[in-house]
Image (tube, rainbow, N blue to C red):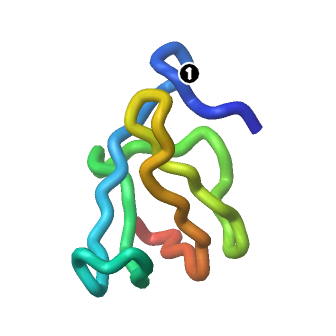
């Protein structure tokens, strides 16, 4: 699936690492805007690639999804 861009609806992701500063850590992540509806389903086993401009800054392997958020 193509990445989102300004025309298709960028959104800010927040990340709270269980072990700050570690190269690898469990983490909680979510959309900064509380009522934001991501235009694609995110499910267990998916990988979310986070970028700053064209630079990849993180990969998230989804282990659980909280539908209540």
Pointer 1 residue: 8
Q: Is residue 67 above or below residue 55?
A: below
User: Residue 28's quadrant in the figure?
Assistant: bottom left
Kindly give the residue lying farthest to the left in the view shown. 20
Residue 21 rendering spot, x and y as whole percentages: 24, 75
Residue 59 rendering spot, x and y as whole percentages: 54, 60
Q: Is residue 65 above or below residue 19?
A: above
Task: Name the one closer to the observer, 4 or 24.
Answer: 24
Quadrant assignment for the N terminus? top right
Task: Name the one closer to the observer, 43 or 59.
Answer: 59
Query: Residue 3 vs residue 20: left or right?
Result: right
Element at label 1: loop
Residue 42 rendering spot, x and y as whole percentages: 63, 59
Q: Is residue 34 above or below residue 51?
A: below
Residue 63 rendering spot, x and y as whole percentages: 60, 81
Q: Residue at x 29, y 45 (%)?
A: 33
Kindly give the residue lying farthest to the top in the view shown. 7
User: Residue 8's quadrant in the figure?
Assistant: top right
Quadrant assignment for the C terminus? bottom left
Number of callouts: 1
Kindly give the residue lying farthest to the right in the view shown. 1
Query: Residue 37 vs residue 1: left or right?
Result: left
Label 1 environment density (alpha carbons within 10 Å; few <14, some 14–19, many ≥20): few
Q: Residue at x 40, y 43 (%)?
A: 36
């Amino acid at each position: 699936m193509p990445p989102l861009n300004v025309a298709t609806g960028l959104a800010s992701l927040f990340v709270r690492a269980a072990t700050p500063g570690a190269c690898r850590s469990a983490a909680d992540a979510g959309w900064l805007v509380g009522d934001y509806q991501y235009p694609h389903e995110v499910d267990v086993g998916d990988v979310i690639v986070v970028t700053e401009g064209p630079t990849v800054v993180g990969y998230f392997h989804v282990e659980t999804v909280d539908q209540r958020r």
